[in-house]
Amino acid sequence: MYIDGLPFKRLHVIDTKHHHSKRLVKSHPVSQMGYDFNIKSTDYLKGGQAFNDVVWLDYCCTASKPFVIKDLKLCQSKWVFCTFSTRACRWKAQIKHVVKGTPYKKAWAYAYNDTSPMILVAYYRNTPPPVLRNPVGKAYKFRYRNKWVHRTCLKLLHGPCDEPNELYLNFKDSNEPIRRCRMVY
């Protein structure tokens, strides 16, 4: 949802035949690459991107794989997001190392847990993308019965069965879709 809310023209993403990433991005055209599409990321990235595009290298492997540096050297977009596993590796040093010899700089890393400890790393050329912040523990406001209600987010929730791609914020007395909530600054 974070990537979908950014301003860009097209998303180039490593995805699977189940189209998990493509289903999350609804506001932009998506081009998919990866083994399930019979095109390796290194081959795909040799052309077809524009500066105003975004590349999401959803690897889910460690940043120490040799193709990571090759892929980053081939990227031409303003922002590149990489999803890495942090299992059994020195990931803090490695995410800085992979951009050497590329036009990119590390903007930030967002740690989270999926099936294992993971990070989403943002790289940029000129202007860094907005920082992705964890909503848990932050104050939000949302409208309920024509009144603004202020609550602190306790945890993130998947949406109900009829909205599987929706993200909800859990508050002490309700669960609200994140799209209806505004962070209180």
Image: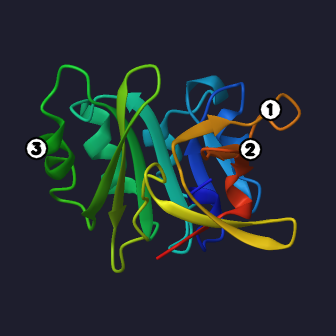
Q: Amino acid at mark 1?
A: Pro
Return the residue at label 3: 93
Is any atom of residue 28 visible in this view?
no
Q: How many neighbours does mark 1 have within 10 angstroms: few (below 14), some (14-19), or many (20 or more)?
A: few
Return the residue at label 2: 166
> Which of the pair 167/74 is nearer the observer?
167
83 left or right of 174?
left
Q: Residue at x 50, y 33 (%)?
A: 40
Q: Residue at x 36, y 33 (%)?
A: 118
Is any atom of residue 67 visible in this view?
yes
Q: How many neighbours does mark 2 have within 10 angstroms: few (below 14), some (14-19), or many (20 or more)?
A: some
Return the residue at label 1: 160
37 left or right of 64?
right
Tell me how far mark 2 sits from mark 3, CA to CA: 34 Å
Q: Amino acid at mark 3?
A: Ala
Report the mark closest to the observer, 3 or 1. Answer: 1
Report the mark closest to the observer, 1 or 2. Answer: 1
SS of the residue at dot 2?
Answer: loop
Image x and y of residue 124, in percent = 35, 68
Q: Residue at x 46, y 59 (%)?
A: 138
SS of the residue at dot 1?
Answer: loop
Mark 1–mark 2 CB contact (< 8 Å) = yes
Q: Is residue 184 above or below residue 65?
A: below
Q: Amino acid at mark 2?
A: Glu
SS of the residue at dot 3?
Answer: helix
Tell me how far mark 1 sits from mark 2, CA to CA: 8 Å
Tell me how far mark 3 sits from mark 1, CA to CA: 39 Å
Q: How many neighbours does mark 3 have within 10 angstroms: few (below 14), some (14-19), or many (20 or more)?
A: few
Image x and y of residue 131, in percent = 39, 65
Mark 3–mark 1 CB contact (< 8 Å) = no
Say which mark, if any, is on residue 183. Answer: none
